[in-house]
Image (cartoon, grey):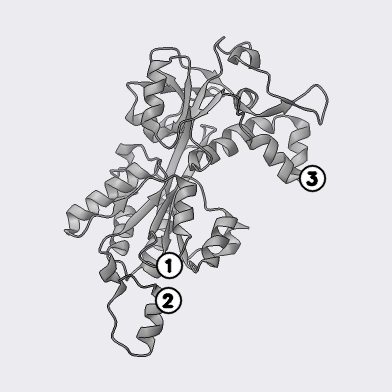
């Protein structure tokens, strides 16, 4: 029988004998980002082999979907950890708190780049964030300041004559994906704010500014391909004019089939993402439910493995999977947070 942690704490406090909650589940359950999934999986496998204990169960649900499950409550019917390719939002943090998930540990593990990739059968594209915005935004600026029109462009050369005269067709993740959020914030917004009157709008009407910059067209130019990056690669191979949006780590794993576009002249590489010269890069995270630590066995061991130098260090095994390591100082701070189980504060997100 599954019991909520709060119930167990109360019963234990009055001295009654109860069946430990840990009896309900003997392995760590992790949900969340499809981008972080391969990293979390290899850490789980290494942890299981090294300790002989139950290997953590890793499920790919997307960053938004994972946080929704994670924040739904405390108890073994809910996940212990959720991966995310973006930082938790204030609204999600508040939802966690409202459902009793009051102590959340934020663990930043490394960096990844967002790529706009196409088939290796054709030429790599050199594009700017401004081109990406004008190619994929639902509404774009008209002739006058303050005017917005439905995106009229059908080919990349309509956006910029220097781009290929091919149909705008981009396969990418849905709104529940952290990759989609990061693409909207880093690529779309990065190009959107090149328009002076829209950039000024951020100071006077942030909601409208975000709506303009983050809204992706829905007329077929952008095609939601779910959380399945493998499906995107298959479709890019079938259509050499199409592009796909996914993380650099996945590009690395499929370098024989797809190539990343240059963005403002910079190719997505390990070094360009590490030194932040590549314009569209992001940190990767996972979030831990502190109330489950010591109740569900293996959480502390999994955290120790993930934040060890042999895993996320400069020459750790996660770099072989495409993760870009953080600086020595950042890794040390992350390891301290994870091992000392330091909860994040709401003020961290303000």
Upstream in sequence: badge 2 or badge 3: 2
Q: Quadrant of the N terminus?
A: bottom left
Q: Residue furthest front?
A: 1
Residue underneath mark 1 = 74
Residue underneath mark 2 = 6
Residue underneath mark 3 = 204
Snapshot quadrant of residue 16: bottom left
Front position among marks 1 and 3: 1
Tell me what residue is drawn at x 33 percent, y 40 percent. 319
Real-space CA distance between mark 1 and mark 3, rounded to the nearest whole angstrom: 40 Å
Q: Quadrant of the C terminus?
A: bottom right
Vertical arrangement, residue 116 with respect to residue 292, above or below: above
Vertical arrangement, residue 241 with respect to residue 25, above or below: above
Real-space CA distance between mark 1 and mark 2, rounded to the nearest whole angstrom: 8 Å
- Left or right for 308, reference 211: left
Upstream in sequence: badge 1 or badge 2: 2
Q: Could you say whether the residue bearing mark 2 is in a helix, strand or loop?
A: helix
Residue 226 image position (x, y, % from top left): 45, 35
């Amino acid at each position: 029988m599954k019991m909520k942690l709060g119930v167990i704490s109360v019963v234990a406090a009055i001295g009654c004998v109860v069946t430990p909650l840990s009896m309900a589940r003997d392995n760590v359950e992790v949900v969340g980002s499809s981008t972080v999934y391969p990293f979390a999986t290899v850490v789980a496998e290494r942890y299981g082999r090294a300790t002989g204990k139950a290997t953590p169960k890793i499920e790919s649900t997307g960053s938004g979907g994972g946080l929704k499950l994670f924040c739904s409550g405390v108890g073994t019917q809910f996940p212990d950890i959720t991966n995310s390719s973006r930082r938790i939002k204030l609204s999600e943090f508040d939802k966690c708190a409202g459902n009793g998930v009051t102590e959340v540990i934020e663990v930043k593990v490394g960096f990844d780049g967002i790529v706009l990739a196409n088939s290796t059968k054709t030429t790599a594209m050199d594009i700017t964030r401004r081109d990406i915005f004008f190619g994929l935004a639902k509404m774009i600026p008209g002739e006058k300041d303050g005017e917005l029109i439905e995106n009229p462009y059908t080919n990349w050369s309509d956006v910029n004559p220097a781009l290929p005269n091919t149909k705008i067709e981009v396969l990418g993740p849905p709104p529940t994906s952290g990759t989609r959020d990061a693409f909207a914030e880093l690529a779309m917004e990065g190009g959107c704010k090149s328009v002076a009157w829209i950039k000024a709008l951020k100071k006077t009407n942030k909601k409208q500014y975000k709506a303009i910059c983050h809204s992706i067209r829905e007329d077929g130019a952008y095609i939601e391909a779910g959380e399945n990056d493998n499906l995107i690669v298959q479709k890019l191979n079938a259509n050499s004019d199409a592009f796909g949006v996914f993380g650099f780590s996945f590009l690395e794993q499929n370098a024989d089939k797809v190539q990343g576009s240059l963005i403002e002249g910079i190719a997505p590489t390990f070094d360009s993402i590490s030194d932040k010269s590549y314009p569209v890069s992001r940190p990767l995270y996972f979030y831990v439910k502190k109330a489950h630590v010591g109740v569900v066995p293996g959480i502390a061991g999994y955290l120790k493995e993930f934040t060890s130098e042999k895993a996320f260090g400069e020459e750790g095994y996660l770099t072989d999977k495409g993760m870009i390591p953080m600086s020595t100082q950042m890794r040390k701070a992350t390891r301290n947070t994870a091992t000392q189980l330091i909860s994040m504060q709401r003020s961290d997100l303000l």
